[in-house]
Image (tube, coloured by chain):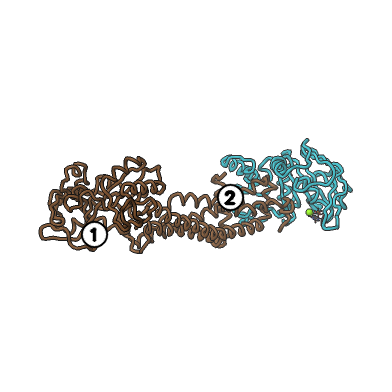
Chain colours: A brown, B cyan
Amino acid sequence: MFNKERWAEIIEALNANRFRTILTAFGVFWGILILVLLLAMTTGLRNGVTSDFGDFATNSLFMWGQGTSKPYKGLPKGRRVQFKLEDVAVLKEKLPELKYVSPRNQLGGYQGANNVTRNEKTGAFSVSGDYPEFIKQQPMDIMAGRFISYSDINEKRKAAVIGKDVVKALYDYGEDPIGTYIKINGVNFMVVGTFKSTNSNGDNEEDANTIFIPFTTFGQAFNRADNVGWMAITAHDNYSITNLKPQIIDIMKTQRSIHPDDRRAIGNFDRAEAFGRINGLFDILTLVGYVVGALILLSGVIGISNIMLIVVKERTKEIGVRRALGATPWNIRLQILQESMVLTMISGMLGIAAASGGIWLMNFFLGPSGSVENFANPSVHVSVAFVALIILIVSGLLAGLIPATRATQMKPIDALRIE
Amino acid sequence: MIKIEDLHKSYVMGSNSLHVLKGIDFNVKEGELVSIMGSSGSGKSTLLNILGMLDEADEGSYVLDGVPIKNLNEKVAAQYRNKFLGFIFQSFNLINYKNAVDNVAMPLYYQGIKRKERMDKAMHYLEKVGLAQWATHLPSELSGGQKQRVAIARALASDPKVLLADEPTGALDTKTSYEVMELIQGINDEGKTILVVTHEPDIAEMTKRIVNLKDGRIIDDTVVKQVIAKSYV
Ligand SMILES: Nc1ncnc2c1ncn2[C@@H]1O[C@H](COP(=O)(O)OP(=O)(O)OP(=O)(O)O)[C@@H](O)[C@H]1O
Ligand SMILES: [Mg+2]
């Protein structure tokens, strides 16, 4: 269909009126440029906003105890609900759909008082008591050493895994923290690992400012016994945490003697749901991008269709001659369709290329850290290129359809008679 | 080769109808060189266009080389035109953005012949009309006579049964006209059937048979002694 000859012929025909061809091509170029840029910006926004979510496993739920709002079994209203370590085991046992149930305890934190010292250096860090699974929920890059292990838990070892910023604050440049000791609230811990957050976008400073210690050690060292501050629960991939949530909460109500209708006693944050809501919003934005881009593209396509109609009119005589020489109507239609396709495709490809250049520039100036609030790494998925390609092919066909039909409507003799 | 019987053609324009061909009976044998003469508006071009399957008669029968030409769809008509007929026009009708050899190769392209073979054949016919060295020139770089030679080469390229020429010398000066007629006579001598529409008596005398048309009827059909164009060139 597209042999060398046809190409040469198409190029010849398009070259015959180069300025007009370029002007026409610009419409499609512009349309696809806007389309791709809109989609890239939407992705940028989506990336920016979702990176605030961190990279904690999406199918997760955070849950903590609050004050009860109803008296129950002789217990007064307004009682503080305290989760216990045994609740974790019960949850795991009753709900095998749950992949991880991590009890957590925390102290210190962002803008807290100085709580960690090493020799003369001190700092304020968030200290977190955790189980080994936690790293599977909250991915982090172990830079040296290891994360907390079950022997740490079982033996209540005073082991600590410290973030990159902790290293920076407490150690000299080039010093190896592994095996050294730090004091957390006056208790000595040995550093067994260092980590940094896996993704440098957004607000993950806090992670790098954290010290992880075994949950059991935390309880002992800071007098929490088997109290659990809050839980991070992740469901297996093929179960929805949002659907499991009522069961989880019901189990916890039984465990903690809370009135079944008490809706305030247990607080939770459903990441999956929040994530889904935000993603839904951006899916709509993406759709808007497609629609707006496609509408702009449409005017480009109409331009091409228009110019092809003029081309057909101008070449009426040529078409007549070709038919006298044996061109079938289909030959002629194909020729017009190919010309409009090539014109659409070339201008569209240039549009995609220009959009890629624009995206590259945006990324270049934004820098890797994302200097603009809620906007990071604008980009389009490869699939967008395919979709754009399909849109272009369809557009080219649509643009050529009417002119192609018009080209063969005339009897050959009438076409030949045109001067 | 060509057999037409009781051919009628009217042009309808609004409520008016113009009866142009009023019952033409006409036969051409293989290898003939026929000129069709007549005053302006007598229906010469109309007849030739019907013979060329560019237009259709209202009534009558037309058989070309044993094939009845009737109610053809455009696709079949195009294929028949390609296979059976070569056209030579008064205004040459070369495609202006294609060079000489590409113009000549056009009918072969629509036959689906591969490029290499197409180009070889096209060059062969360009040589035949004496324009091999002009192969890569655009029509705009050729004289009228040269353009018509290219057009003749193009008409010959698909080795058709019949050449149809509507005033092939109408846009040329006398000397060039005779050169073109010399070429046409040469092609006829090789056995090709050729119909030439003309209103110039000297051109008509260079054919072997003159058919006179008046008001849509043949009023005269005589075999003549051919004047050899070469003697004038
Ligand atoms: N497409 C058409 N629509 C209407 N009338 C037409 C059409 N083509 C030709 N005619 C008319 O039919 C008649 C014959 O036309 P034709 O072209 O066959 O004449 P001709 O013999 O070739 O004349 P000339 O020597 O001037 O070329 C003329 O009166 C012309 O006006
Ligand atoms: Mg005429």
Residue A396 horizontal/vertical position (percent): 57, 53
- For the residue carrying disc 1, how many other residues have a C-alpha within 10 Å: few (<14), some (14-19), or many (20+)? some
Question: Closest to the observer: A388 or B139?
Answer: A388
Q: According to the image, label 1 marks what residue?
A: A109
Residue A360 located left or right of residue B194: left
Q: Which quadrant contains ligand 2?
A: bottom right
Of circles 2 and 1, which is in front? 1
Whether residue A43 can be seen here: yes
* Element marked by disc 2: helix
Q: Mark 2 points at which residue?
A: A338
Question: Looking at the image, is mark 2 or mark 1 earlier in the sequence?
Answer: 1
Cα distance, mark 2 to mark 1?
A: 65 Å
Q: In this view, does A41 lie to the left or right of A291?
A: left
Which residue is at 68% across, 54% downward?
Answer: A317
Percent position of residue A283, x then y = 46, 55
Looking at the picture, tell me which residue is in the foreground, B4 or A129: A129
Say what amino acid the circle numbered 1 marks.
Answer: Gly
The one of B134 and A316 positioned closer to us in this rendering: A316
Which quadrant would residue B226 be assigned to in this image?
top right
